[in-house]
Amino acid sequence: MSSPSYDSSGTTVDAGPFGAWLADARASLRGSVGAKVPCGDCVGCCVSSYHIPLRATDAAAIERIPGRHLVQSRAGTLHIQYRPDGLCPMLEAGHCTIYPHRPQTCRDYDCRFFAAAGIEAGGAERSVINTRVRQWRFTYPSPADQRAHDAVRSAAAFLQREASRLPPGFAPAKPTGIAVLAVKTYMVFLDPDAVRTDAAKLAQAVVEASQRFDADIDE
């Protein structure tokens, strides 16, 4: 999986202090707060061939989405089907037509996860998002912020490099899953001694850290 390179246009976008972002990102994954992303005029997530899963709590959105734009997965989950050109069908003239009632998935989406993990969001179909990922610039008010970011990137690199050491079905294959799991388990990689330990032991520590994080979600 490729790492983001510097945006050739020289444009940068302030991603905020890393430690504060990380705390908010983990809280968002736990469902305790929503993502607060300074998107500006970027609509990358709306034009990048994403199927948008809908939840029972998205009733207001479902009421406003024509049935021809909805599909059901094999698991029974309802999704918004993107158009042949990769755009969300609810996007018109660069604006979301159901923005006040948009699905929770849209509210939670934060492409800074990829910038934090040091990876891109995908291939050519994610080119707009990848441009923004390369533009994000975190700040580091304290050494702890920098250490945390280094740990998240180390976690993402480990998940890609040592995926075979993780239990079957545990290692995420897609960029979003890698970035999210790196944020969940980054604390394993804060300890330099832990990072240098046997890869199998490190893989077990990652699994345990993920389980602890998910247990907190369910409490």
Image (tube, rainbow, N blue to C red):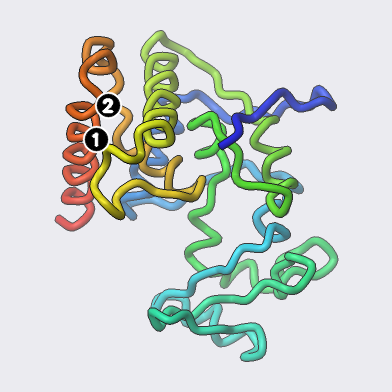
Nearest the viewer among 79 and 20 is 79
Establish if 177 lies above or below 11: below
Quadrant where the N terminus sits is top right
Instruction: Please tell me how crowded label 2 is: few (under 14), some (14-19), or many (20+) other residues with Cα within 10 Å.
Output: some
Q: Secondary structure at mark 2?
A: helix
Q: Earlier in the sequence, mark 2 or mark 1?
A: 2
Q: Which residue is mark 1?
A: 206
Q: Position of residue 5 (x, y in %)?
A: 69, 25
Instruction: Return the residue found at the far front.
Output: 164
**Which residue appears at 52% of the width and 58% of the height?**
107
Q: Position of residue 132 (x, y in %)?
A: 69, 38
**Which residue appears at 55% of the width and 68% of the height?**
52
User: What amino acid is labelled 2 in the image?
Assistant: Met
Quadrant where the C terminus sits is bottom left
Q: Which residue is mark 2?
A: 187
Establish if 121 lies above or below 11: below
Q: Quadrant of residue 135?
A: top right
In the picture provided, is 153 more to the left or to the right than 137?
left
User: What amino acid is labelled 1 in the image?
Assistant: Val
Nearest the viewer among 94 and 74 is 74
Instruction: Return the residue found at the far bottom.
Output: 67
Instruction: Please tell me how crowded label 1 is: few (under 14), some (14-19), or many (20+) other residues with Cα within 10 Å.
Output: many
**Which residue appears at 47% of the width and 80% of the height?**
73
